[in-house]
């Protein structure tokens, strides 16, 4: 099953809204607390979640109570309870914890109070914290990628290397919880692909340590620019998209836009802090991709078709015996009308595919393997590179992607996000394909799937699945070639 998530962001996105939506969708708060404890910073915060109302709609609000703020909250509890939350909290996040890069510490509570943090964490320290936590592999990879995107954006804004970007001590704690917690929740839900709606720009200004910043903030603008994010104005002059939430979206998104074809199975609602003109709720849709459901139904149909063909085959075998016994006379009549080839022509299937191409000469070669994996996750049918010589005799590669038309935008988004390309060529082509089905054989080492390609009723190619052979070879300590040979032999013997 291809499980996907669609983030509907009518009032923007922030880390705490993502966490609220995940808890609302069923991720246990206790699980998040337990796993985040591995980061080794649990003395710096407390986590809680509660159901709240935004414009009469119920959603889950996720709170990260930082240890530095707890005495302040305790002393001002009576005063705070008398205030309208919309007058004391920022639209989607606690502004004091908003983790812009260098010199971006925001105020909260008293409107003009200046907050300064003398301690901070640089990106390498944050990466070290994440790696040392021994989190699930996907969580670690996603978390490091999100922080990398955030640091790249801040570095571009301030004109410094990403490694020199520092996150103020309080803001870094909040960011670690928001980013790693969101990745933990998505991994717990076992999501395979992520899609996001267009983002509202917001408006107005937000107070920072050295004055006010225009909304959208510079880091958010940089992320939108880098990842070609579609944006619009919903008429709300507040900060709606935080750098943390935007970095999460830009890192994980297969595409931005309307919901993909899917069967919705679960909805998670994450509340922002402030009451706005429309419900301040991030809506997380979780379901099964329609293509996956269609393939499953097709698989069932092919299975039934296979049974029918098996019975048909038995009948043809008997018919063949009868024809053999009919004698030479019939053979001579048949030979009066010989076919030009040894086999009758068989019909083939045709389909429309998109071909995406771009040439690259300034990308770390180590990234190419990651780009391949990301493109296949986005729906690519095939991905390959060709060595080329570019202008000024620079060596480069031509990256080519083949996909169905419905996955074209998602694959282009991956190419822009994960490579240094500034442009992608696209073309639509027709391709002829053989019908294929998956059969299975049981070897002495384990089960292997066999891909059988046919032209009409004629089998033209039979190949054991590479991954099955490779996994058995690793587990049983035998050669891949031996597993491949044995599987193929068993199929033909059968």
Image (cartoon, rainbow, N blue to C red):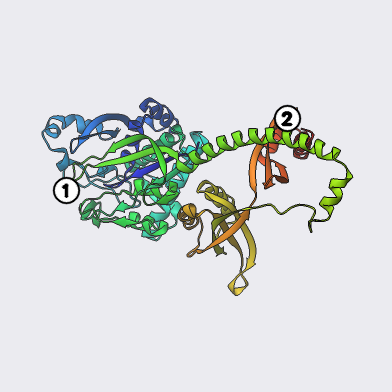
Label 1 packing within 10 angstroms: few (<14), some (14-19), many (20+): few
- Residue wearing tag 1: 112
User: How far from the left and from the top, in percent, is residue 206?
Assistant: 23, 52
Q: What is the number of callouts on the image?
A: 2
User: Picture coordinates of residue 50 (x, y %)?
Assistant: 26, 29
Quadrant location of the C terminus in the rendered image = top right
Q: Is residue 201 above or below residue 20?
A: below
- Residue 488 visible: yes
Residue at the farthest top position: 30
Image coordinates for residue 69, horizontal then vertical, percent: 25, 35
Above or below, 411 relative to 392: above
Residue sitting at x 59%, y 52%: 382
Question: Which residue is tagged 2?
Answer: 476
Locate residue 331, reporting x and y percent: 85, 47
Label 2 sits on a secondary structure element that is helix
Q: Residue at x 49, y 43 (%)?
A: 291
Spatial distance from mark 2 to mark 1, Cα to Cα? 67 Å
């Amino acid at each position: 099953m291809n499980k996907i998530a669609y983030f509907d962001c009518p009032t923007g996105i922030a880390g705490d809204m993502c966490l609220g939506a995940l808890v609302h969708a069923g991720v246990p708060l206790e699980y998040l607390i337990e796993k985040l404890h591995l980061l080794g910073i649990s003395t710096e915060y407390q986590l809680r979640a509660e159901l709240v109302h935004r414009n009469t709609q119920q959603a889950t609000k996720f709170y990260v109570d930082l240890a530095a703020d707890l005495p302040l909250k305790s002393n001002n509890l009576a005063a705070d309870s008398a205030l309208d939350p919309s007058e004391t909290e920022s639209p989607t996040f606690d502004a004091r914890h908003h983790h812009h890069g260098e010199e971006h510490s925001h105020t909260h509570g008293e409107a003009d109070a200046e907050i300064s943090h003398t301690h901070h964490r640089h990106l390498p320290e944050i990466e070290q914290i994440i790696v040392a936590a021994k989190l699930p592999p996907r969580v670690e990879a996603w978390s490091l990628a999100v922080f990398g995107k955030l640091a790249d954006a801040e570095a571009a804004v301030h004109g410094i290397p990403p490694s020199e970007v520092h996150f103020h001590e309080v803001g870094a704690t909040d960011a670690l919880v928001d980013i790693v917690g969101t990745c933990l929740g998505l991994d717990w839900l076992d999501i395979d692909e992520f899609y996001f709606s267009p983002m509202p720009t917001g408006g107005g200004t937000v107070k920072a340590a050295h004055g006010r910043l225009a909304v959208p903030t510079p880091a958010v603008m940089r992320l939108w620019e880098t990842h070609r994010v579609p944006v619009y104005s919903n008429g709300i002059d507040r900060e709606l998209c935080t750098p943390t939430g935007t970095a999460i979206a830009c890192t994980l998104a297969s595409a931005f836009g309307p919901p993909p074809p899917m069967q919705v199975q679960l909805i998670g609602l994450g509340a922002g802090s402030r009451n706005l003109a429309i419900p301040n709720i991030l809506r997380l849709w979780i379901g099964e991709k329609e293509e996956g459901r269609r393939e499953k139904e097709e698989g069932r149909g092919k299975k039934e078709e296979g049974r029918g063909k098996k019975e048909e085959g038995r009948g043809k075998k008997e018919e063949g015996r009868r024809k053999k016994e009919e004698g030479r006379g019939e053979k001579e009549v048949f030979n009066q009308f010989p076919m030009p080839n040894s086999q009758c022509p068989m019909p083939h299937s045709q389909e429309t595919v998109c071909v995406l191409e771009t040439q690259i000469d300034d990308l770390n070669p180590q990234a190419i393997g990651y780009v391949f994996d990301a493109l296949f996750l986005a729906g690519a049918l095939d991905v390959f590179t060709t060595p080329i010589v570019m202008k000024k005799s620079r060596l480069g590669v031509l990256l080519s992607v083949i996909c169905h038309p419905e996955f074209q935008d998602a694959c282009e988004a991956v190419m822009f996000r994960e490579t240094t390309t500034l442009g992608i060529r696209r073309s639509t082509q027709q391709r002829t394909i053989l019908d294929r089905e998956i059969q299975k054989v049981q070897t002495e080492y384990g089960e292997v799937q066999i891909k059988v390609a046919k032209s009409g009723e004629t089998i033209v190619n039979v190949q054991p699945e590479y991954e099955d052979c490779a996994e058995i070879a690793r587990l049983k300590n035998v050669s891949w070639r031996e597993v491949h040979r044995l599987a193929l032999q068993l199929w033909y013997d059968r």
